[in-house]
Image (cartoon, rainbow, N blue to C red):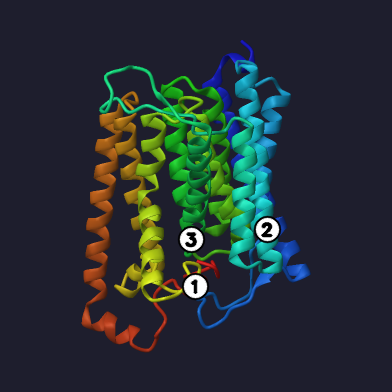
Amino acid sequence: MTLASTPLAVAIGIFVVSAMITMVIAPVVRRLGLRHGFTDTPDPRKQHSVPMVRLGGVAMVLGFCLALGLTWLFGGFGLLSPARDQLIWTTLAGSLCFFVIGLADDLFSLSPWPRLAGQVAVAVVVWSQGVQIGAIDLPWLSSSAEAVVLPDMISLLATVIWLVGITNAINWLDGLDGLAAGVAGIAAIGLVSVSFSLHQVAAAFLAAALAGSCLGFLRHNFNPARIFMGDGGSYFLGFSLAAISIVGPAKGLTTVSLLLPLLILSLPLADMSAVIMGRLRSGRSPFYPDRRHLHHRLLRAGFSHRRTVLLIYVFTQWLAAIAMVVANVEMRFLWLGLATAILVGTVVVIQRQRSNDRDPEVELSASDSSVPEDCSQSCCSDPHG
């Protein structure tokens, strides 16, 4: 039995290899960053109290790329048609370009508009190479089984908004240790499941590599973080998720491939929209940095750093389970039941812990500190969002 004849085994191998490579490389990147001064210096707006390396995205990209490269080298892409093979490399190239844009910002502190212009330019090129929203399947609006083919200009506009919008939603989510990597990892696992259920091996391989890089990086990024992914890492994650959702069930965008990332990422997408509207109402730029994000609000409501992150994790995995039901994934109701149980159980435990924290003795001992629990490292690692 050849490697290419067992796509599920290949996906598992990609996941494991990507996670291990990322996990091993991240400490090396951290040491090099500290040695050469590539750090994020604390200031009054940020919560971390020591300089933190913001180049963790390098480890994630290397884990992602090397895992896919090794798979190709050992024949793991053997079942893919040439067109699907090309989509993998186009997605990989686009994710690297987005990573470079974010890395340039990490190193040189670019203003928002050049970064946005670079993202749009890369999205246009990726669209021209086939990673595009070419058709939309809306069965509830049409009795025809065929998808509605979009004109080129509408296809281009929809693709650019999709790629750039999700990328920046993940970037703005990167405000707490482990938050962006965890949410992106959950989304990637959901994409793996749906892609296999619809026999889309190329998308499954990409999503498995992305999920592995997220898991490997969380080993060093979960609170208290020892390294940040930086804008390079968050741009890479956001673009990869957006592109994989297009590469997935069809060359165009079907109802399934649209709803999955929208459902899974509805929390960061809604948060980004609310923050932008709030800034505009205040007469400020949409890119003005403030503390309006959901995770800031949860922290001000009294949740600790870790509890805030875990709460967003479990809500995201519940949304992913709903997306699997919509996508008609095998054993979907079992996964939804488990996800609901995890969500309810986590909320109950957190509420009980918060009730215990309100004990008078606990409040008295905590009154000497004005810093929220677990916030000494990085309650907001992104200086732009």
- Spatial separation of the CA atoms under disc 1 and disc 3: 10 Å
> Does residue 373 sit above or below 33 in this rendering?
below
Residue 353: percent from the left, percent from the top?
26, 66
Say whether disc 1 or disc 2 marks the residue closer to the N-terminus: 2
Q: What element does badge 2 sit on?
A: helix
Q: Residue at x 39, y 23 (%)?
A: 147
Residue 219: percent from the left, percent from the top?
55, 53
Residue 212 appears anywhere in the view? yes
> Does residue 142 sit above or below 54 in this rendering?
above
Which quadrant, please, contains the N terminus?
top right
Picture quadrant where residue 6 is located: top right
Residue named by callout 1: 289
Q: Residue at x 52, y 37 (%)?
A: 153
Decide if residue 284 is on the left or right side of residue 299. Answer: right
Q: What element does badge 1 sit on?
A: loop
Looking at the picture, which amino acid does disc 3 mark? Trp
Q: Nearer the viewer, residue 27 or 126?
A: 126
Decide if residue 141 is on the left or right side of residue 304. Answer: left
- Spatial separation of the CA atoms under disc 3 and disc 2: 15 Å
Dot 3 alpha-carbon crowd within 10 angstroms: few under 14, some 14 to 19, many 20 or more: many
Residue 103: assigned label:
2
Dot 1 alpha-carbon crowd within 10 angstroms: few under 14, some 14 to 19, many 20 or more: some
Judge depth for marks 1 and 2 and give the one in front. 1
Looking at the picture, which amino acid does disc 2 mark? Leu
Residue named by callout 3: 172
Picture quadrant where residue 38 is located: bottom right
